[in-house]
Amino acid sequence: MQIWGIRLFFIFASAIAFYFPDTNLTDALIGFAIACILVAGEISLHLPHTRRIVSSVVGLAFGLLISQGLLQLLDQSDSIFQNSTLKTVVILGCGYVGMVCGYYISESLPVVKLLNSQRYIQTGTPFNTSDSNGFKILDTSVIIDGRILEICETQFIDGTLLIPRFVLNELQHIADSTEVLRRNKGRRGFDILRSLQNSPSIAVEIIEEDVTHLTEVDAKLVHLARKYFAKIITNDLNLNKVAELQGVTVLNINELANAIRPIVVAGEIIHVHLQKIGKEPNQGVGYLDDGTMVIVEDGKSYIGQTLDVVVTQMLRTSTGQMIFARNVDESPSEKGLR
């Protein structure tokens, strides 16, 4: 609401400034209209498409001004530039170069930092964009995974979530798949994105820019992350490795999940519901509430039951951790007699 107060003050101050010199109501209305146009233009800069148009028009204006200065300089001497056709070529050339430069400047880093302003207007909550922590790019896998929504709602991740257009295209391709499982994953991804956008505590912006000289989505993500000094949020191990090799900071959801899992030590007694037979003879397999696999020795006969088991060993892998245990009612000596 503070920004709207500033805008209203500017509008009324402009009207008063135009009114008082001649105390003319018409002049006040002109000042009021000019101020409204300027405020509307400032608001439109927060929209990606409008920002490009405005930047192109400004670039065109600068190009035409440069062309006029160049023509005046060349008119002072007898040269081939006295020809009206060549003058037109100079004007059109400078205007076009200025327009194109304005368009590409709108895609550069200083302008991209305005992405958070729209969210600031809506919520009144500023986001940190002064360093690399301000921008975080989501890849397709982490959107489909869905846990990013709950993590952001807890406000452990701040700043602006950037979603490239080519990620949305890949998500659309998955949602249009003939395979039921892939189609459901794609639709779940769009549901997660909708929830992220509707959350008042999360800033989400769509990046329209594409990296045309690259074909792989992972390579495009790394390119954008390096350009915008952003971090990548993913649960793709391969993207994780590629990005880190190129100096891009990666926030891996799976690594976070592994880090916050409760620590279990050897000798601790836990409750587990055995669900299936293990790979080795007589093993039973169950899972903790957080998804950790528990392998119980001689637990085959207890499938479908909930047991108190004692932890004998912990094994960490790239996908998580595994717990090896035995029935707490079975002592090691009894096991040796079997």
Image (cartoon, helix red, strand yellow):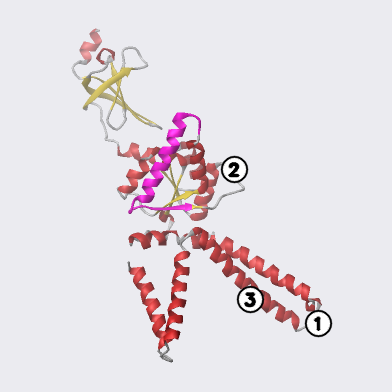
Front-lying residue, 158 or 199: 199
Locate residue 227, reporting x and y percent.
52, 54
Start-end of magenta stretch = 177-206
Residue holding disc 3 = 65
Locate residue 76, reporting x and y percent.
75, 84
Nearest-to-viewer mark from 3 and 1: 3
Q: Badge 1 local density, few (<14 within 10 Å), some, or many (20+)? A: few
Q: Residue at 64%, 71% (x, y): give it.
A: 63
Question: Of callouts 3 and 1, which one flags the residue occurring earlier in the amino acid sequence?
Answer: 3
Residue holding disc 1 = 78
Cα separation, mark 3 vs mark 2, equals 40 Å
Cα separation, mark 3 vs mark 1, equals 22 Å
Cα separation, mark 1 vs mark 2, equals 52 Å
Looking at the picture, which amino acid does disc 3 mark? Leu
Question: Of callouts 1 and 2, which one flags the residue occurring earlier in the amino acid sequence?
Answer: 1
On residue 282, the disc is none
| Left or right, residue 314 beside residue 107 | left
Question: Image height check: is 28 above or below 333?
Answer: below
Question: Of callouts 3 and 2, which one flags the residue occurring earlier in the amino acid sequence?
Answer: 3
On residue 215, the disc is 2
What is the secondary structure assignment of the residue under circle 2? loop
